[in-house]
Amino acid sequence: MVGDTESGKTNLLRRVTRGITAHYAPDEAKIIVVDYRRTLVDAVPEEYRIGHVISLDNLKETIDGAARALRTRVPGADIAPARMRRCDWWTGPRLFVLVDDYDMVSGGNSFQSPFEPLFEDLTLGFEMGLHLVVARSAMGAGRSLGDALVRRLDEANNPAVLLSCPPTEGHLFGNTKPLNLPPGRAQHIARRRARLMQTALVEESTP
């Protein structure tokens, strides 16, 4: 997810959180929030939250722990293709990792990504119960395409959301050209095709 300041990135992360808690019980889903500015601290109910990351050291420790847990879910050679979508060879909650202001976390292209322990799991994310949602600023978004995590997400053919973004950033997410859009309006890109969408506003005062 990429967007200008006040374009609706954090609001959309709040909407994602609402969807998770509406669809899953606390024992079926757990959420890690990477949120240096602490704008999402009240968005995730305590019974769902297993981590609220506000520093690099905390991030590395949390992601390393998540990666160790996911190692037990890697499908072995005995798992038939028909079982892959059923995800019936492991037990436990699905893990949602929500990252706000990723540009504050990444530290530039030369920085070794703290999310590297999860890279091997991204291709089979759904099958292993891993969901990673990353939001970053539109400023410098074109240069961010060289970031290791962004490349891995793109290679795994994950859908993307492009909120208002200066066209001068160049083509992002395949051939999709950024547009100057009203807050909450976005381009949803899936399978290299883009369609315009409007995200719903989440009132922060709502519990």
Image: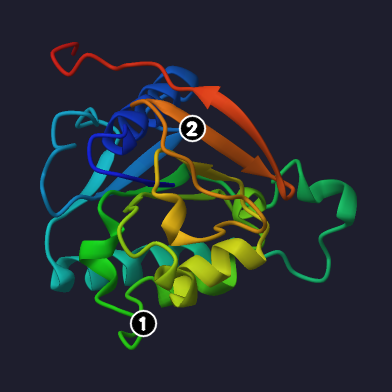
Type of amino acid at the residue the image marks with label 2: Ala
Mark 2 neighbour class, 10 Å CA radius: few under 14, some 14 to 19, many 20 or more: many
Return the residue at label 1: 109
Q: Horizontally, is 179 left or right of 157 in the view? A: left
Q: Position of residue 66 (x, y in %)?
A: 38, 62
Type of amino acid at the residue the image marks with label 1: Asn
Q: Horizontally, is 81 left or right of 161 in the view? A: right
Question: Residue at 60% across / 63% down in the picture?
Answer: 154
Q: Is residue 5 visible?
A: yes
Q: Secondary structure at mark 1?
A: loop
The answer to which quarter of the image holds residue 47 is top left
Sequence order check, earlier mark of 1 and 2: 1
Q: Horizontally, is 185 left or right of 74 in the view? A: left
Q: Quadrant of the C terminus?
A: top left
In this rendering, the answer to whether 130 lies above or below 60 is: above
Give the number of callouts: 2
Question: Residue at 33% across / 88% down in the picture?
Answer: 110
The residue nearer to you, when weighing 72 against 2, is 2
The residue nearer to you, when weighing 84 against 174, is 174
Task: Residue lying at the far bottom in this picture: please name it.
Answer: 110
Question: Residue at 69% across / 52% down in the picture?
Answer: 89
Q: Secondary structure at mark 2?
A: strand
Q: Is residue 72 visible?
A: no
In this rendering, the answer to whether 87 lies above or below 148 is: above
In this rendering, the answer to whether 56 lies above or below 21 is: below
Task: Residue lying at the far front in this picture: please name it.
Answer: 168
Kindly identify which numbered label has been placed on residue 162. Answer: none
In this rendering, the answer to whether 107 lies above or below 182 is: below
Q: Position of residue 95 (x, y in %)?
A: 44, 47
